[in-house]
Each structure stands twice: as structure tokens, then as C-alpha cells.
Image (cartoon, rainbow, N blue to C red):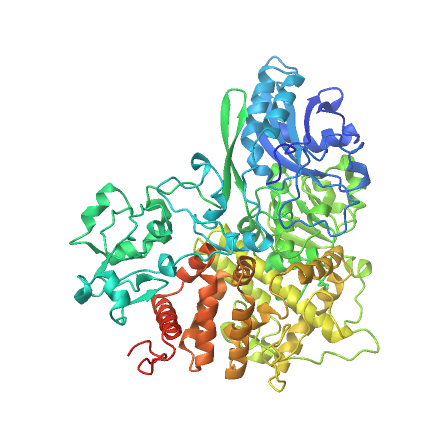
């Protein structure tokens, strides 16, 4: 990611001296120009002597007191780390790059020493947010230093990290990162590794290799994305005859010159193309079948060499059709997970394996866990203090995690206290909170720049002077400090709101004077993942009137249920990304209703079919006027407070940049997808307009990926669009086929089409085949295009 070198800017080593206290002993390759006592205290946290090993994180270049000086002499154009994909400077080029410091603290017991132990810390400074990849080499370097305490150890560590080769790592756009993190498939974007030598590719020679998606070439045959089947009565039929001599049966047809079989029933034969290709393509991985001019039985690659025993007379069992792409671990040719770039760091005589995550955003630093955060603060009984409307969006029933989110986005001063806890654990909570507020880095930003994962008394004045700081401390003396607004004690799971918060943040009117109150209300339903107010009320066992903006609580109940049923961290992160996305769209609607326009969203309009060219709707709306007013009113205070923060300024800049760089232009894609998903009534005219707009504007690789980035798994992926294959109007079916044909032209699109159920896949391919025949025989009166048969 970027050029080689520049991964490590500095290496620091600090030791605790019994007389002088924490001392910064070495700075390599040059002094940072920061107060050495501040660095030493940050590297040697309180209570470090009680832990054998501890990891902490802190940042440089946040504030004047921790900004390095002089500017890095190593930052020449040849070695400077390139900006991460999706990390735009947005006119902030005058600000120094934020440096992440990963710090390893160790207590070395030695009976010959006066206090029986030596406490020291070794740290590296890097611009990369995925600092966790450097833990193995840092552990080895500290062992090396203990064996030979000299600055040569720091030089070896510096050179080893900077020699790490990341030049082959794919550079992903924001949309590609979103698609990658939504997918559990270990081969997602495998075509991005095609430029690497075979030994460095994430898949071996026998695994699939996509062609490059940067070209405009079509990704041949969606056959590779469909589960195949063959009717029992056609097992002896030649493929060429099927294509050229007869019309397709209910189970087979020709698409793009290849015979395609659809379904997961028994009786399917697995075949390969006439060219005799080996199983080094996508279909060997996903368990699909492509036939050319003649049928040949293909060697099995589904599990092991012994898997052929599961075939009977060439028949592939249903159990071998479906799991092949869902359980990639079962395939012998499967290599490494494409969610990571695999490389090594050569330290001394060791080659340390490194897995660099490819879908990390700048607001996601290190290892963090939203599951841990939710588990630690899950009871409203543990919340105390005044109920400020910036924090409480559902009265006394507001969940502690929602209180934390509200405090993050409204710019409150937050402290995580972990008395007698390792400093590394406290740091993790701070990093998790930053991810929570930013929507896992995918929606908002500005949280990491005011985060102090480990803070102490030595630099108290500096970090407390930062507005809206997010700090982690281990000293209980901070409980009595008057400078925080929200204190979260990770030891007992309690949340305390400052008693003078109303004085610090006076409550103001939510509607500016002289402007009308909330007026608009309905364009399309609220997101299905959160449900409408009526649905939420039913779930809560109450009527609509008593459902006072409880969408947040229902959301947290869903999150807790997912954790209880052992859904992974990735699922929880995706749900919080959805939540923050919805908050931003809601805030955009509020801003438009109160001041007449919005700076970071599309205006709220409804579909208008009265014009010669129908105008699509845009923006956010609700199920009805009452529900819309109630939800906006319930969120008004936190939205007003958020509009005064840096996070709001950043989202306005990001939206303006997106309007210039988005490849799908001219309409609000999210609005159209929500209309298809949630509208109780969608007219034929609007459905035709939506599908035609998508098929006309989603053609290139970048456009396909941008569309897929909107389709979160909880929303069903392409499933709702696939219902267009069953629509009563020919125009909708035709536009859906055009759109899917354009999506399947690229490997990642084929992956998403693969996720459709058998009925949807079958309907699409039948329609595509019928359209193909219609184009080939436009003047044949005996052909019924609607059915694709004679």
C-alpha cells in the first residue's frame, strides 16, 4: 500500500529508573523534538510493573505539545508513505500526518536489581492505522534488546520494518473496501492479486484467477456464478446441439455461447469447457459448471483427491454444489484470505509472517472490539447523572452505548477509566469508541485526532485542553476531575454523566428563529434494518403512541442478540456502520427541514412522473408524517449539537468531494434502493424509472462496485433488485436483465449474483437467454420473447 519503505518513522525506547523515574533512553534515527518526559510517561503507564507485557497506543502530531519537530527529514518523495486508499487530505495539507505509536511495555524480573525487576518499553511510530501487524517484530526486537541493550537493536528494527515489501498490495478505493468488508468470501477481489508472481498470490496455481477488472472486457459467462444442474433426460445431449439445434428446456439454456445449468437438484453433471481448461478458474472454486462445444467430465476439486468417491456415474450431489463457495476451507487449492495482503518482515534470521488488512480506514486504529464495548456497557441501571438531551435520545431508557455514541458525535469530553486494569485494555476501549462514532471509519471522521488511548497526570493539562477529547486513564483520581462530561468505568460497566453538564452545554431551541418547523415527512420508508415506528412499537409490545423514538433501543437489542448467538465482530461492525449511515441521512433531512437546505445530502423529493422525463426521488423520508416528525424531534438535539463539531465539517467536505468523484451521477442511489426495499406501494412508473436509471448508469467496473457498496448484507444484497425479474411489466424485467448483465461482467459482480437464491438466479438467466435469442432472431414471428421458447 504505497511504496516500499516509510512504514516506520521512528523507534523509541524508554526505561524506568528508580531514582529519575521514566526516562526516554533512545530515539532513532533522530530526536523527535517532543518533550522527552511526555514521551517516557506515555510509554511507561502507571502500574506497568504489575504486568509482564502490555500494549499501549498513543498518537503524535495531534496537538502542539506532541507535534514532532523538526518535520521528518526522512519524508522524501521516494520513501514517504503514500496516502491510504480513500484517505483524502480534503484541503488539510498544512496539517502534519498523524503518527500512530505502538508501544510494548515489559517487566523483566531480576533478583539482582534493587527493586527485583526492570521495566522498559519499545515503540515504533507509523502512519499506518493497522499497527497490530507490527506486534510480532516488536516482540522479537524487545527480546533482542534485553539480550544486547544497545541502539543497534533499534536500528535493526527500523530497517526491518521499512524493508517490508507492501508494493504488491492492492490499492482499494473506498467502495472496494466497503464491498470487501461486507463479504465473508475468502476470494473476494482475488483478481487484484493477478499481477503478483504465483508464489505471492493468495491462491495457488490450482485455485481461481480472475482477469483484471480494470479493463473494459466482459467477465465471460455468469455460468461461473451459478449453481448448475442437468435434467436426467438430457444427460446424453451434446452441448453444441443444445446451443444451436434446439430451444432451451426448463433447466438449461445458452448464455454467451456456453451452456448453463441452473439449480441445486440432483442429477447435475459437472463439466468443463472444450478447451480443456484445468480447474484454475472461478468455477473450480464456486462449484459451478461451464460447457463448451462438447462435454467432458471434470476432475473433482471440491474437497480432496478422495472426493471423487462421492460421485456416482458422473453425478454431482447437491451437497457438493452449494457449500463449495460458502466453505472455502474445504478446498485443497485454496490459499490465503484476500481480505489481507500477506508479506513478511525479515528480522535477523527470522522471516515473520505479516497479514496486512486491506479494508482498514484511517479512523480504525489497531485491534478494537465493538463486541467487547457492548458487553462492558449493556445495562441502563448502571447509568447515573443528569439526563441531557444531547445524550438521552430515548429518556431514561436510552442504552449506555447510545449515550456513548451521542457523546462522541456531539463533541463531549469522554474518559474511559480502568482502575487496576492494564493500560492496553483501556486503550482498546478508546479505539473501539472512535470506531463506534465513525461508523467503523466508513462514514464519519475526526475522532482519532482527538483520541488519547492512554493519558496520564503528567500530560493532563495538554490533553484536557483538546476540545471533545476521548481519553483512557488508569488513575482513579480522574473521577474527581471537573473537566469530563462522560465517564465510563470499564471495571464495573458504569456510565456517569457530569452533574454540571447543563451548565457546560445549555439546551437551545432545535429550530432556528424565523424558520418554519418540520414540514416534510414522507418520501420512502425508514430503513428496514431499524424498522418503522409501527414495527418497532409492535416489537416492543406497545402501541404507536407509546413508542417514543425507541429505534435506538431496538437496534441495540438486535446487536445484543447477535452477540448472544455468536455472530462475529465483522457482523457487529457492519450493523454499526448502517446505524451511523442512517444517523447521517436523518441529520441531513433535519437540516433541510429546519434551514431549507442541506450541505451533506440530497434534497428530499418524491418521484414525479408528470415531466416528460420522470424525476426520481431523493433524500430521506419516513412511513408517514407522524412517524417522521416524531423521529426527527427525538433526534433534533443531538443533531443540532453535532452540527457544531469538526465531524460535521468533515462530512460536508466529504460529501462535496463525493459529488465530484462518484461514478454514478445524477440521482440518489441509496434512496432508490430503499424505495425498492421498503416502499409499501411502488408504482410501475417509478419502478421502471428506477431500474432504467440503474441499468443506464451502472456499466463500468467503478460504477458496479459503487452500486454494490450500497448493498449491505443485512439489506439482502441484490435480492430486492432481483425481484425485478418477476415484475409484471416487461420494461422492468428488461432493465433488470440489462443491469445484471452489466454487473456479471466483472468478477465481484458475479460473486454478488451468486448470492441470489435458486429461483432468482434461474429467472434472471432464463430472461437473459430469451433476450439473447430475441436479439438474434428479431424478425422471427414464431418466437415468443416473453417466454424464450417457440
Name the spot of residue 368 as percent of width and height, x first.
57, 45
From what the image shows, is residue 704 above or below residue 198?
A: below
From what the image shows, is residue 762 above or below residue 71?
A: below
Q: Nearer the viewer, residue 763 or 152?
A: 763
Q: Nearer the viewer, residue 342 or 376?
A: 342
Name the spot of residue 586 as percent of width and height, x first.
65, 69
Determine the residue positioned at 72% across, 46% down.
449
Is residue 50 among what the camera can see?
no
Q: Residue furthest top?
A: 112
Q: Nearer the viewer, residue 515 or 383?
A: 515
Q: Is residue 332 left or right of residue 427?
A: left
Q: Is residue 29 left or right of residue 439?
A: right
- Tell me where residue 69 sits by quadrant: top right
Name the spot of residue 15 as percent of width and height, x first.
68, 23
Number of callouts: 0
Q: Residue furthest bottom?
A: 610
Quadrant (top left/top right/bottom left/bottom right) for the N terminus: top right
Q: Is residue 534 left or right of residue 596?
A: left
Is residue 701 among what the camera can see?
yes
Amino acid at each position: 500500500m504505497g511504496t516500499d519503505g516509510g512504514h516506520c518513522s521512528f523507534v523509541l525506547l524508554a526505561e524506568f529508573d528508580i531514582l529519575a523515574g521514566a526516562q526516554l533512553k533512545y530515539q532513532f534515527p533522530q530526536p523527535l523534538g517532543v518533550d522527552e518526559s511526555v514521551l517516557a510517561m506515555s510509554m511507561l503507564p502507571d502500574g506497568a510493573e504489575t504486568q509482564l507485557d502490555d500494549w499501549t497506543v498513543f498518537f503524535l502530531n495531534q496537538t502542539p505539545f506532541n507535534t514532532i519537530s523538526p518535520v521528518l527529514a526522512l519524508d522524501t518523495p521516494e520513501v514517504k508513505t503514500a496516502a491510504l486508499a480513500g484517505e483524502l487530505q480534503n484541503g488539510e495539507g498544512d496539517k502534519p500526518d498523524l503518527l500512530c505509536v505502538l508501544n510494548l511495555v515489559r517487566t523483566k524480573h531480576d533478583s539482582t536489581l534493587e527493586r527485583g525487576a526492570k521495566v522498559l518499553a519499545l515503540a515504533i511510530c507509523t502512519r499506518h492505522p493497522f499497527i497490530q501487524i507490527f506486534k510480532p517484530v516488536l516482540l522479537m526486537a524487545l527480546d533482542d534488546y534485553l539480550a544486547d541493550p544497545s541502539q543497534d537493536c533499534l536500528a535493526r528494527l527500523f530497517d526491518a520494518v521499512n524493508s517490508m515489501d507492501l508494493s504488491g498490495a492492492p490499492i482499494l478505493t473506498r467502495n472496494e473496501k466497503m464491498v470487501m468488508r461486507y463479504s465473508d468470501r475468502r476470494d473476494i477481489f482475488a483478481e487484484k492479486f493477478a499481477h503478483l508472481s504465483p508464489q505471492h498470490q493468495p491462491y495457488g496455481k490450482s485455485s481461481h484467477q480472475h482477469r483484471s477488472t480494470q479493463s473494459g472486457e466482459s467477465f465471460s459467462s455468469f455460468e461461473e456464478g451459478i449453481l448448475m444442474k442437468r435434467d436426467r433426460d438430457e444427460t446424453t445431449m451434446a452441448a453444441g446441439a443444445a446451443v444451436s439445434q434446439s430451444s432451451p428446456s426448463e433447466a438449461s439454456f445458452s448464455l454467451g455461447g456456453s451452456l448453463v445449468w441452473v439449480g441445486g437438484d440432483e442429477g447435475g453433471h459437472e463439466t468443463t469447457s472444450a478447451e480443456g481448461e484445468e480447474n484454475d478458474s472461478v468455477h473450480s472454486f464456486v462449484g459451478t459448471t461451464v460447457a463448451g462445444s462438447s462435454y467432458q467430465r471434470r476432475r473433482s476439486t471440491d474437497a480432496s483427491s478422495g472426493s471423487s468417491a462421492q460421485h456416482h456415474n458422473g453425478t454431482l450431489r447437491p451437497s457438493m454444489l452449494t457449500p463449495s463457495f460458502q466453505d472455502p476451507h474445504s478446498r485443497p487449492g485454496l490459499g490465503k484470505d484476500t481480505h489481507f495482503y500477506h508479506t513478511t518482515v525479515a528480522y535477523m534470521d527470522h522471516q515473520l509472517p505479516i497479514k496486512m488488512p486491506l479494508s482498514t480506514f484511517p479512523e480504525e486504529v489497531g485491534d478494537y472490539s465493538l463486541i467487547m464495548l457492548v458487553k462492558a456497557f449493556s445495562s441502563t441501571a448502571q447509568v447515573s447523572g443528569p439526563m441531557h438531551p444531547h445524550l438521552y435520545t430515548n429518556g431514561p431508557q436510552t442504552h449506555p452505548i447510545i449515550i456513548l455514541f451521542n457523546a462522541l458525535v456531539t463533541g463531549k469530553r469522554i474518559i474511559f477509566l480502568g482502575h487496576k486494569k492494564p493500560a492496553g485494555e483501556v486503550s482498546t476501549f478508546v479505539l473501539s469508541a472512535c470506531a463506534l462514532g465513525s461508523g467503523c471509519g466508513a462514514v464519519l471522521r475526526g475522532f482519532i485526532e482527538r483520541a488519547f488511548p492512554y493519558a496520564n497526570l503528567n500530560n493532563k493539562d495538554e490533553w484536557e485542553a483538546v476540545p471533545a477529547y476521548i481519553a483512557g486513564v488508569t488513575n482513579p483520581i480522574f473521577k474527581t476531575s471537573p473537566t469530563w462530561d462522560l465517564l465510563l468505568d470499564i471495571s464495573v460497566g458504569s456510565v456517569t454523566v457530569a452533574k454540571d453538564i447543563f451548565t457546560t452545554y445549555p439546551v437551545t431551541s432545535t429550530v432556528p428563529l424565523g424558520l418554519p418547523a418540520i414540514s416534510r415527512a414522507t418520501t420512502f420508508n425508514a430503513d428496514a434494518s431499524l424498522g418503522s415506528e409501527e414495527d418497532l412499537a409492535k416489537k416492543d409490545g406497545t402501541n404507536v403512541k407509546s413508542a417514543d423514538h425507541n429505534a435506538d433501543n431496538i437496534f441495540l437489542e438486535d446487536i445484543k442478540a447477535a452477540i448472544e448467538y455468536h455472530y462475529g465482530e465483522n457482523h457487529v461492525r457492519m450493523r454499526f456502520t448502517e446505524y451511523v449511515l442512517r444517523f447521517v441521512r436523518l441529520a441531513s433531512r433535519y437540516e433541510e427541514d429546519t434551514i431549507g437546505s442541506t450541505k451533506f445530502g440530497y434534497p428530499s423529493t418524491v418521484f414525479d412522473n408528470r415531466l416528460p422525463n420522470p424525476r426520481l426521488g431523493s433524500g430521506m423520508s419516513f412511513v408517514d408524517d407522524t412517524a417522521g416528525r416524531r423521529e426527527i424531534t427525538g433526534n433534533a438535539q443531538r443533531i443540532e449539537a453535532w452540527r457544531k463539531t469538526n465531524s460535521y465539517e468533515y462530512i460536508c467536505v466529504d460529501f462535496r468531494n463525493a459529488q465530484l468523484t462518484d461514478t454514478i451521477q445524477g440521482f440518489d442511489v441509496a434512496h432508490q434502493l430503499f424505495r425498492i426495499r421498503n416502499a409499501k406501494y411502488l408504482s410501475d412508473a417509478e419502478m421502471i424509472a428506477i431500474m432504467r436509471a440503474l441499468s443506464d448508469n451502472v456499466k463500468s467496473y467503478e460504477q458496479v462496485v459503487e452500486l454494490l457498496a450500497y448493498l449491505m448484507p443485512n439489506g439482502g444484497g441484490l435480492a430486492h433488485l432481483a425481484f425485478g425479474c418477476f415484475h409484471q411489466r416487461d420494461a422492468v424485467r428488461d432493465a433488470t436483465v440489462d443491469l445484471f448483465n452489466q454487473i456479471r461482467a466483472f468478477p465481484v459482480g458475479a460473486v454478488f449474483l451468486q448470492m441470489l437464491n435458486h429461483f432468482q438466479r434461474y429467472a434472471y438467466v432464463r430472461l437473459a437467454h430469451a433476450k439473447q435469442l430475441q436479439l438474434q432472431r428479431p424478425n422471427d414471428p414464431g418466437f415468443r420473447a416473453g417466454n424464450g421458447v417457440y
